[in-house]
Image: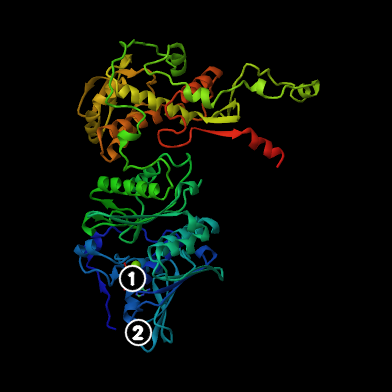
Amino acid sequence: MSDIIKLLPDHIANQIAAGEVVQRPASVVKELLENSIDAGATEIKLIIKDAGKTAIQIIDNGIGMSATDTRMAFERHATSKIDSAEDLFHIHTKGFRGEALASIAAVAHVEVKTKTASQELGTHLKIEGSKITYQEPVSTPTGTSIAVRNLFFNIPARRKFLKSDHVETRHIKEELYRIVLAHPDIKFLYYYNDSENLNLPKSNLKQRIIATFGQKMDERLVPIEENTDILKVTGFVSKPEFAKKKRGEQFFFVNNRFIRNSYLHHSVINAFEGLLASGYHPSYFLYLKVPATTIDINIHPTKTEIKFDNEQALYAILRSTIKHSLGQYNAAPVLDFNRNPDLDTPYSYKDKKNVPAPGISVDPDFNPFKENLERPSGIYKKNTANWESLYTRTSIATETEQPSDNQSTLLFPNAKDTSNYSTLQVHNKYILSVIKSGVVFINQHLAHQRILYEELLTKLTVEDTASQQLLFPITLHFSFGDMVICNEIKNDLESIGFQFAAMEKDSVTLSGLPENVIPENLQGLFESVFDNVRNEIPESNFSRIDTIAKSLAKGLAIKNGVALNELEREKVLEDLFSCKEPNYSPYGKKTYITLPSEEIQLKFDP
Ligand code: ADP
Ligand code: MG
C-alpha cells in the first residue's frame, strides 16, 4: 500500500477549530476507536487498565499503516481523510482534523504496532512526549494496535486533575457505548483490568442494545421508524413504564455520529408527555439520517454538537413518530393522535352558549380555592353522578374501627379526634379519602389539572368569560416566534379571560386575567403554552384549543408539595368527581388510584 497521508495546508488547519482533544482517558478512547472504525476494522478490542490512567490499548483489524504513515500519523494536522476545507461538508469518516494522534503522543507514552495487508513485516514505533524513541520492523497481524500509557505523564497538574477511577471509567464507558451503538456491524471486545467486560458480536441494532445493556432490554423497547424527505428515523425508545430515575441511556445518532441536542431531546420527552411520572426519564436510541448539507457538525471541537437547518420540522416529525409508535405498541393507552378529536372530547365545541355577565374581582390576595368555595357553582353545570355512584364516601372516623378501650388512646396519645375529617393529605401530594369499597388516593396536581382543563375547555367554548381586572397591567416580553403564536391564539386566550391592553412587536401587556389565575410566573406559563401550540401537529381548530387548555391547566394546577387544608382537599375531591372524565389528567395520567378493602385485608391475611 502506498503512503496516503498528506499534511493539511496551514490555512485549512486554521479553518478547523482546534480544540483540546485530550481531556481525559475517555477522549483517548474515543479518538482511537474512531480511527479504527475509519480504518475499516470489523473487530476492535479495547483494553483499559486503571481507568485508563495506566494504559489504554486498542487493537483493530483495519487497513493498518505503512512505516512512513505511522510516523506521519503523529504529526499535527496529518490526516489521510481530507484535502480541502470543502471536504469538511462531505466527510463520512469520524476524524478529519488530523490532530488526535499528535495530541495524544504529546502527553503520553505511545506504542504502535501496525501492518498493512500488502506488507510482510509491520512497523513497531514508540513515541514519548512527541519524540520517537524507537522504530523497528515487527511481525504483527494486519491492522493496528495502539497502546497509550501514563497519560499526562509530563503534565502533572492535568494528571492530578483526573477524577476517581470510578468516574473516569464511567466516561470511558459512555464513549464506548456511543460507538458500539453506532456500529452494530462491528465486533467489539472490552477488557477492564484483565477481565472481559463486554463482548459484542456483530449483530443488528436491537441485539446490540441488548448485548450492551442486558437481556432486560428485550421487553422494554418500542421500535421507531419514519421516512420523510428531510429525515429518516430508526431506532428504539423504552416503554414508559421502564423509565428511570436516572437520565441514562439516551442516545441520538445523526448520520451515524453520536450527538447531543437538547432541542431534539425535548421533542422525545414531549412525545412521552403524560406517560412519565415526574422525575423519570425514558431511554432512547434514535438514529437520524438527514441530508449532509442540512447540518453543521463543525461547531464544536469534539463534534458531539450539531446544528440543523430545519430544527422545527425535525422536532415535529420526531415527536409525532414516537407518539405514534408508543400508541401502536399500547405503551400509551390514551395517546392516539390520529383519532378524530371531535369524537372524544367531552365537550361539544359547536354548542357555544351564552353565560351570565361576568363579575369583576380585584382581590390582590386572590386564592383560587377560597374564591371557588365562596362562589356559587360556576359556569359549568356540576355533574355529581360520578361522585355519587362510584365514590360514596364515609368519614374516616366512622369507617375506621373506633378505639374500643383506653389502650388505643394510650398508643396514640397525641391523636386528634378525626371524626370530622373525611380526607387526609399524604406527603403534601395525595389526598386520601375513605370510600365504601376501600380507600382512594388522589394525586392533587393531576386531579387539579383535570379540573382546570375541563373548566378551561368550557370557557374556551363559550362566548364570555369572567376576568379579574389587574390593578397594575403586566407587560411580558417574548421572542418574535412566540409573538407570532400569541397573535394566532389571542382570541382563544381572550375567551379564557385574558385581557390584552396592548400587543407590541415583542411584548404584550395584560390588563386582565382569568378568574382562577394567580399573576405569578405568567411568563413561564405563556411560554409553555406557545411551545406546546408550536409543536402541536395542526389537525383541527379543536386540537389547538385543546392544547391551550391542557398546557394552561398543567401550568396552573396546584403543585405537588403544597399543603392543602380540609376545605381545599374537599374542593379538589368534589370538583374532580364532578368532571366528565375524572379518571385521567388531560395528559393521560391517572388522577387517582383506589385500594380496595379486600386488598388491604389480604395484606394482613395473605
Ligand atoms: P484523523 O483521524 O483526524 O485523520 P488522527 O490523528 O486521529 O487524525 O489520525 C491520523 C491518521 O493516522 C489518520 O488519518 C489515519 O490515516 C491514520 N490512522 C490513525 N489510526 C489508524 C488506525 N487504527 N488504522 C489505520 N490508520 C490509522
Ligand atoms: Mg482520528
Q: Residue 395 bears which disc, if any? A: none
Q: Where is residue 582 in the image (x, y as percent from the top left)?
A: 46, 29
Q: Which of 347 and 562 is in front in this view?
A: 347
Q: Which residue lies furthest to the bottom in this view?
A: 120
Question: Is residue 130 at least partly visible in the picture?
Answer: yes
* Residue 148 seen: no
Q: Mark 1 points at which residue?
A: 38
Comparing 475 with 31, the one in front is 475
Which quadrant: the C terminus?
top right
Q: Is residue 70 above or below residue 463?
A: below
Residue 117 is labelled as: 2
Does mark 1 have its CB less than 8 Å from ligand 1? Answer: yes
Callout 2 amino acid: Ala
Q: Is mark 2 on a helix, strand or loop?
A: loop
- Picture quadrant of ligand 2: bottom left
Q: Quadrant of residue 296?
A: bottom left
At which x and y percent is residue 117? 35, 84
**In 3D space, how far apart are the residues under numbered discs 2 and 1 (Cα atoms)?**
16 Å
Q: Where is residue 392 in the image (x, y as percent from the top left)?
A: 56, 23
Say if 187 sits above or below 303 in the image.
below
Q: Where is residue 124 in the image (x, y as percent from the top left)?
A: 42, 81
Mark 2 within 8 Å of ligand 1, using the beta carbon: no
Q: Residue at x 76, y 21 (%)?
A: 409
Q: Which residue is drawn at 29% across and 64% down?
A: 97
Q: Residues within 10 Å of mark 1 (few under 14, many from 20)?
A: some
